[in-house]
Each structure stands twice: as C-alpha cells, then as structure tokens.
Image: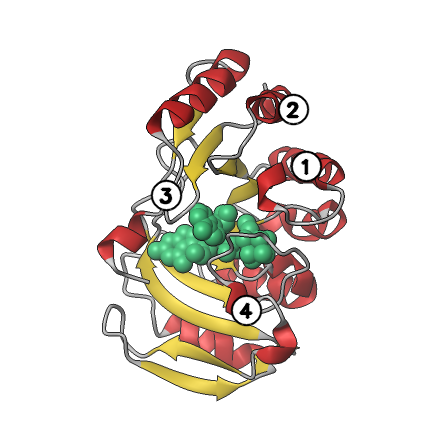
C-alpha cells in the first residue's frame, strides 16, 4: 500500500496544554502526512498542503540529531512502518498522526493505526476534523484525538460555520468510540468573542477546549484573558485551558 508522506520524527508533544486527552510533554513518534483540503491563513505546514508538490518524504535517523534520510513519494507503507519502529526509543507515549490532514488518506491511516495497536503502541490523531465520515473509519482505533475548531479568522474554507459543525460531529464520533478527545482553537487578535461563545456552546458537555494563540503570537494578553473567560463561563471552569506550541520555543521538531 502506498501513501504520500511528509516526515517521520521523534519529539515531545508540544501542544495540548493540561486538559484531559492532551499528551503535552509526552514523547511521541510523529507521522506527518502530505496533503490538506483546507488552507488556514497561519498554517505552519504550508509546504505540505499540496501533496503533488511533496516529491519526497524524510525520516529521522536518530531522534534530536537533525539527521534525516529521504525517500521518494508515494511512500511504501512498510517503509513508513520501519521508519516509525526505528524511532521507538522505549519511552514513547503514542504515535501522533498529523499533517497536512491525515484523514485524507484514510485507508493508509487505518492500516498504520492497526499496525501500531498490534505492536502495543497507542494512537494519537491530530486532525481538523472536517470529514466526520472519514473519522468514523478510524475512531475505534484512536486512543487520543486533538480536533481543531477552525476559527473564522483561520479563513480555512468558504463556509467556515459548516466546517465547525462537522468538526464538532467528528468530536462526537471519536468520543462515542471511546477516544480521549479535546478541541483546539487557534485564536488571533481578530478572533470574535461571539464566535468563541458559539464554539463553547457546541462543545459544552462534549469535550474540553484548549485555546492556542496563533504563532508567532500577536494576540494581546487582555484579549486572550477575555476569550478564555467567555469559553470558561459557558463550558465550566474545569473544561478550558491554554495551549502554546512549546516545541517552537525549545527549537525541536
Ligand atoms: C499543521 S496542523 C495538522 C493537523 C490538522 N490538519 C489540523 O489542522 O489540525 C497541526 C496543528 O498545528 C496547529 N497550527 C498550525 N499552524 C499554527 C500556528 N501558526 N499557530 C498555532 N497553531 C498552529 C494547527 O491548528 C493544528 O492544531
Ligand atoms: N513537537 C511537536 N509537537 C507537535 N504537536 C502538534 C504538531 C503538529 O505539527 O501536528 C507538532 C509538531 O510538529 N512538533
Ligand atoms: S487544516 Fe491543518 S494542515 Fe491544513 S491548512 Fe489548516 S493547519 Fe494546515
Ligand atoms: Mg506543527
């Protein structure tokens, strides 16, 4: 089986803060798929959005060395499995599937997840959640899920409200299948408080929310405080937290 891959590396999970379902600070093997159907204004992985332009993928030879080997795309699934297994340092919490958007290559994702489960490794899915019909196919294999809620200011797609509703549906499917799931909202200085209230109403009683400032951070602290408070008043004080992209401050992958 073939798939279009971007990179495989081993690092600490840098996002998610302290809400249940987060793997922040845990050692993970990251499997970054190429290709995405959205186009978030602030996406830090823009070079992987158009899969047809990702001619090769890379895998770390040894964690934290910055040494990579390269292979042409499409990748052989067995080569991706080998790249993952050689990065199992024995202290790995779970395998993180990210991208790009991993659910777009759902058959390969499913086979990879099944393989990792059979080897005793947990699966952590990092997704925009915009395709609930695909999420359904891997929900039973997902131990942890971080599902983005794409704010209006992400300008990810035309009908952003319809996208938000699909993301919430994905969260529901994952939760019902037994995954530990949280929602992640990337906020900017332009994020509207009434939109945050709407996301919070949709998530109330369903999943906790982390609010993650867009990097590089431009949102004022007063605004962040205001958005946090609004979400917390709707969802409950234990169900909201902050998340920062800590790996960027540590200068690790
Ligand atoms: C690159 S995305 C890949 C997974 C999936 N496509 C998604 O958007 O959730 C991984 C995570 O990085 C976050 N992210 C990407 N660029 C960011 C930025 N400039 N600032 C803050 N978070 C960012 C996304 O919101 C998402 O949670
Ligand atoms: N260390 C680290 N943590 C991460 N959490 C989410 C990431 C992503 O790009 O999906 C990511 C990443 O690329 N590196
Ligand atoms: S959905 Fe994820 S990979 Fe796609 S553009 Fe947005 S942040 Fe980037
Ligand atoms: Mg990232």
Residue 209's spot in the image, x, y percent? 49, 29
Q: Is mark 1 within 8 Å of ligand 3?
A: no
- Which residue corresponds to mark 2? 202
Residue 83's spot in the image, x, y percent? 42, 76
**Of helix, strand and loop, which one carries label 4?**
helix
Gap in angstroms between the C-alphas marked 3 and 1: 23 Å
- Which residue corresponds to mark 1? 164
Q: Nearer the viewer, residue 232 or 124?
A: 232
Q: Residues within 10 Å of mark 2 (few under 14, many from 20)?
A: some
Asked whether, in this view, residue 154 is left or right of residue 244, the answer is: right
**Of helix, strand and loop, which one carries label 3?**
loop
Q: Which of the labelled discs sits on residue 217, or is there none?
A: 3
Gap in angstroms between the C-alphas marked 3 and 2: 26 Å
Give the label, 3 or 2, closer to the camera. 3
- Please say whether residue 95 is visible from this viewpoint: no
Residue 146's spot in the image, x, y percent? 51, 43
Q: Residue at x 34, y 49 (%)?
A: 14
> Residue 159's image quarter?
top right
Gap in angstroms between the C-alphas marked 3 and 4: 22 Å
- Which residue corresponds to mark 4? 48
Gap in angstroms between the C-alphas marked 2 and 1: 9 Å
Gap in angstroms between the C-alphas marked 2 and 4: 30 Å
- Please say whether residue 16 is visible from this viewpoint: yes
Does the residue at mark 2 contact the one at mark 1 (Cβ under 8 Å)? yes
């Amino acid at each position: 089986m073939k798939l279009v891959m971007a990179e495989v590396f081993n690092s600490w999970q840098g996002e998610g803060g302290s809400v249940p379902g987060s793997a922040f600070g845990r050692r993970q093997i990251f499997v970054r798929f190429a290709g995405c159907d959205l186009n978030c204004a602030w996406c830090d992985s823009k070079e992987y959005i158009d899969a047809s332009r990702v001619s090769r993928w890379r895998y770390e030879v040894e964690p934290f060395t910055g040494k990579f080997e390269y292979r042409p795309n499409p990748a052989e699934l067995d080569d991706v499995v080998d790249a993952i297994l050689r990065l199992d340092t024995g202290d790995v919490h779970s395998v993180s599937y990210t991208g790009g958007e991993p659910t777009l290559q759902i058959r390969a994702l499913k086979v990879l997840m099944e393989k990792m489960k059979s080897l005793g490794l947990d699966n952590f899915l990092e997704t925009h959640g915009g395709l609930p019909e695909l999420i359904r196919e891997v929900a039973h294999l997902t131990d942890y899920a971080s599902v983005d809620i794409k704010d209006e200011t992400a300008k990810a797609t035309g009908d952003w409200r319809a996208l938000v509703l699909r993301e919430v549906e994905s969260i529901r499917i994952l939760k019902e299948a037994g995954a530990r799931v949280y929602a992640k909202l990337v906020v900017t200085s332009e994020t509207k408080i009434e939109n945050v209230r709407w996301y919070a109403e949709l998530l109330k009683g369903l999943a906790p929310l982390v609010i993650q400032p867009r990097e590089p951070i431009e949102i004022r602290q007063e605004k962040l405080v205001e958005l946090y408070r609004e979400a917390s008043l709707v969802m409950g004080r234990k169900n909201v937290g902050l998340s920062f992209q800590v790996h960027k401050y540590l200068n690790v992958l």
